[in-house]
Amino acid sequence: MKILSGDFLFMEGEKNTAIYIVQSGSFSAIQKRGTLVKIVETFGPGSIIGQLPSEESYLYPYSVKAEEDSIVEKITDKEIITTLSKTPIWFSKFVGFLQKRHLLLLQKNQKKQAILALPALLSVLDHFFRTTNLTKIDFNDIITALEPLTSIKAEIISNLCKALSAIGFFKYNNSSIELTHPAVPSLLHMVFTEKILEDKIPSLILSATDQILLETFAKAAQQNGRLLENRFIEISGLAFSQEAPVYLKKDRKIFNSLIEKKIIRLESANSGLFNEDKIYGDLEHISDLLELNRIYPLLDHELAKHL
């Protein structure tokens, strides 16, 4: 069948009822998100467009438009099923096996693409926050910003956003992203970079004890903290002790790791008593670190679940 230049073979969201084999000419697969139109795939002579019939319904994920006068061979579901019914049963099962393998490979590739897109997405979110100071970002703006960084489809980015939204990283409603902790994308990007470059547990990923210490500091700071000019909060060792779990020792050694990472600063009292010490920390940064450490262990599970 002949398809004239500019005509559509099918539209995004239509039910798959046939496959098309391109004999001559060329086609573009197009996705539209709001005002943004993006070419996500191209097809030339010999390409197969569509998917063989299966037990699961399949909707076209994009529209396909002819870029020039083209000729395709259309093979409908009924024709495929009729042909397969005339072949030995082992051949039908073999074709079904190949179809399932193809779908699995597509799904696996989609997950891989989404994971590869994550650092770019984090970088874009961080850039938006730092340059606009806004916490709500239009999804189309994100796709536009990602275009020079990655060729990954908008649909995959959307699925990635759903996975991140599921763990409370941000709020996502298909049209916008709202950050609950605007500094966390930058922190998570730093974590991935450090993990890749140094192949070890990143320094911003804290032990369970350090997380409890920071949670205790945050609770004590909200109750009895004194805000200093440099945005740091000061609390006393006594205020910390009153909020700390009973199993946590109230001595200076428990802060060594946080002090080395410059998350907490401790000033010992002349009396030598811990309760009279002064403990300092940036409460906003500590809140972001706690959110980062809540999210990080959940990422693998949610990415596997939603992608």
Image (cartoon, helix red, strand yellow):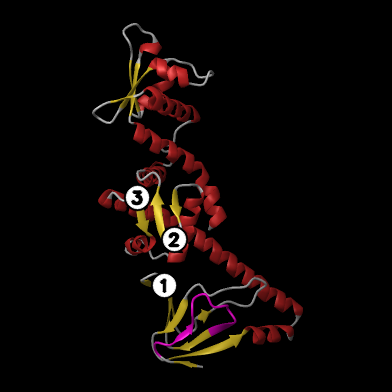
Measured Cα–Cα span from mark 1 to mark 3: 25 Å
Please name whichever residue, 296 or 276, is drawn nearer the observer in this view of the structure.
276
Q: Residue at x 40, y 35 (%)?
A: 287
Q: Label 1, on which residue?
A: 32
Q: Is residue 232 above or below residue 116?
A: above
Residue furthest top as drawn: 271
- Residue drawn at 56 percent across, 74 percent down: 59
Highlighted magenta segment, given as a residue range: 5-20
Q: Position of residue 257 (x, y in %)?
A: 40, 26
Please give the name of the residue rendered at 74% of the width and 76% of the height, measured from the top-left corner. Answer: 90
Assign a secondary structure to mark 1. strand
Mark 3 or mark 2: whose residue is earlier in sequence:
3
The image quadrant that residue 5 belongs to is bottom left
Q: Which mark is residue 157?
A: 2
Q: Amino acid at mark 2?
A: Ile
Mark 3 residue type = Thr
Image coords of residue 52 (percent x, y): 61, 77
Q: Which label lies toward us, 2 or 1? A: 1
Q: Is 139 contained in the magenta span?
A: no
- Rate crowding at label 1 as few (under 14), some (14 to 19) or many (20 or more) other CA atoms within 10 Å: some
User: Residue farthest to the front?
Assistant: 223
Counting from the top left corner in percent of width and height, residue 19 is at 57, 82
Q: Which label sits on residue 78? A: none
Q: Is residue 125 above or below residue 201?
A: below
The residue under the point 43% across, 73% down is: 31
Q: Can I make out residue 201 in this image?
A: no
